Amino acid sequence: MATDGTAAAVPSVAIGYYLWTDVFGIMSMTLFWTYQNDVFTRDESKKSFGLIAAGAPLGSIAGALLMKLLVGSMGPVPMLMVAAGIFAAVLPIFFFMERRAKDRKAADTNAAEDKAKEKPAQGILKTIAKSPFLIFLTIVVALERLVPDITNYLYSVAAKAAYAADATGMAQMFADVNFYTSLASFAVSSVLVGLTLKKMGTGGALMTAGLVNLALFLMFPFFPILAVTAAFWGLDGVMRYTWFKTAKESSYAATDRDTIYRVKAFIEMFVYRFARGLAGLLLLGVAWAGGGASAAALVGVPLALLWLYASWRMGREHRKLEAANKEAGR
């Protein structure tokens, strides 16, 4: 342990903390949205999930401001304690939510809830393979992580080229782009998502982020500059954390409880992380083959097109699922 009390003096602690927060982050968000899908009805999810999702960019804005204001005077270790206190505040909030949920009618929109109690659940992969909706949802979730990682790579390459020896300037630029992206995401989630999702439909909303990434991949070989990549990186963040996020999460409400509590966790955690590893391998393959950032952008083009197709098909299958639920009176 470091004698000066700084966590940064022990690399293993820093690495372990980073890994824990990364795993905790994805698990907690998956469980959070699983809970929302169980509590909210299909119609309520379309109206409310955009506003709920606005909490993420709002937290990002608040966290960035707290760090900027306090880290200079308090130092990094006390700021970690502040973060731990914020995490701890989640527990009473959850108990409050749970008590309110019990006072209202629970979301009874799960297609095979009673039947699931009578027979053992099928294997997760078999469950996915038997449902066209879940097949295309799995593909969309995989591409949701894989494609933006290529965009992140292009963004970092352009940033390093623009700020070759100015690490401070580059850090400030990243902070500014993150701040304005979060601000735009909060505004869109709070005002526009609920109003426009019905008109766009699930498929259209899922396609928004894919279109942004596709546009960057097509433009980057001709305009490999920071202004372009930063703008599209920000747009990707706004789209994925507003219309895309709301459409994807609300679509689970049309499924049964087995899907919400068992299959969703597999898709949102294992598939999501596996896709990120695959993105890293693709980028390493491009580098091994001697290709540069423009080659990586070209590799991303067919993946972005697949995102658009899978989103369209998922939207179509989701409409069929909702129609079947209405016909059955669920």
Image (spheres, rainbow, N blue to C red):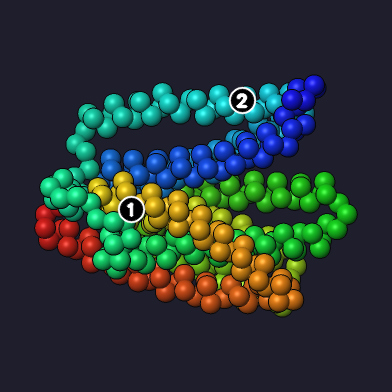
What residue is shown at x 36% (from left), y 51% (from top)? 264
Using the image as rendered, state which of residue 82 and residue 124 is in the foreground.
124
The residue singled out by tag 2 in the image is: 82
**Quadrant of residue 122 in the image?**
bottom left
The residue singled out by tag 1 in the image is: 263
Left or right, 164 with reference to 215:
right
Mark nearest the camera among 2 and 1 is 1
Using the image as rendered, state which of residue 228 and residue 322 is in the foreground.
322
What residue is shown at x 81% (from left), y 63% (from top)? 161
Precedes in sequence: disc 2 or disc 1: 2
For the N terminus, the quadrant is top right
Relative height, residue 118 to residue 124 (above, below): above
> Which amino acid, by three-letter code, is at mark 2?
Val
What residue is shown at x 68% (from left), y 33% (from top)? 13
Looking at the image, can residue 298 be seen?
Answer: yes
**Residue 128: x %, y % from top left:** 31, 62
Classed neighbour count for the residue bearing mark 1: other residues with Cα under 10 Å, few (<14), some (14–19), many (≥20): some
